[in-house]
Amino acid sequence: MGSTVNLVKTSSKLVREAQELCYAWLDNIDKHIADNINKITCSDIKEIYYSSLFGELKRWRSCSSGFTGFSEYLVFRALYHIIGETFTALETGDIATDPIVFRSKNYEIGQSVKIKLDGNKRSPDIYVKRDGNLISIIQIKLVTGGGKSQITEEVETFKLFKKFYPEVKGLFIVFIKESFTKEKEQKLRTVGYQTLILENNKTSISSILKQFI
């Protein structure tokens, strides 16, 4: 149920104890997701992020900026438990970013792992392979800032994926609706992206993610 990644070895007892505390925190959230995977809604994922991390950090350090990756963690672990197979964590050998991929009998999933597209490489927030074939990529944004340029870049990247993997599906997840205009949504949908706004969305997250595995 929990992570299959071992703690990084350290000779310091104090650091090791801190590691164990961090691991326990992530593991407890992961178990909560696993135990409730068929009940958690899209809105719940958004609220878990903003209540358990975004809001709480302000109590400890006055703001919550500079702490990234937790939104992807929540979606990734939901996907992990929806697939429901036994995964093995494997090093990719990429020295620059040192990511890990998770492989099971039928699936491979990873986050921010470089995927070769002819002479190009792209690192989607999350990708899913089934039987060795890339079947979906998932991009995750708390908000869609950056104006039109951010969406244009996402569109061009997905078009590149479609060029080399014509059957690949794309899911663009936005946590907060406010900045995600109809124009941005239409631009993404034009190239085949499915869009998902988590805020105030009572649809179960599993019913959505199952479409991309």
Image (cartoon, rainbow, N blue to C red):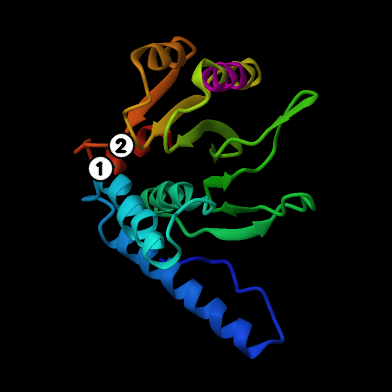
Establish if 8 lies above or below 41.
below
The residue lying at 70 percent from left, 81 percent from top is 10
Magenta-drawn segment: 150-158
Image marks 2 and 1: residues in contact by CB distance under 8 Å: yes
Placement of the C terminus among the 4 image quadrants:
top left
Establish if 47 lies above or below 22.
above
Residue type pointed to by label 2? Leu
N-term-proximal mark, 2 vs 1: 1
Left or right: where does residue 36 sit relative to residue 13? left
Q: Secondary structure at mark 2?
A: loop
Instruction: Tell me which secondary structure the magenta stretch mostly adopts.
Output: helix
**Count of all numbered marks drawn on residues in the image:** 2
Label 2: how many Cα within 10 Å (few below 14, some 14–19, many 20+): many
Placement of the N terminus among the 4 image quadrants:
bottom left
Establish if 42 lies above or below 30.
above
Residue 151 lies in the magenta-colored region: yes
Q: Quadrant of residue 55?
A: bottom left
Label 1: how many Cα within 10 Å (few below 14, some 14–19, many 20+): some
Left or right: where does residue 100 sit relative to residue 193? right
Where residue 71 appears, x then y in whole percent? 44, 48
Residue position marked by numbered label 2 in the rendering: 198
* Distance Cα–Cα, label 2 vs label 1: 5 Å
Residue type pointed to by label 1? Ser
Residue position marked by numbered label 1 in the rendering: 43
Establish if 107 lies above or below 54.
above
Q: Residue furthest bottom?
A: 13
The residue lying at 55 percent from left, 17 percent from top is 155
Where residue 75 appears, x then y in whole percent? 41, 46
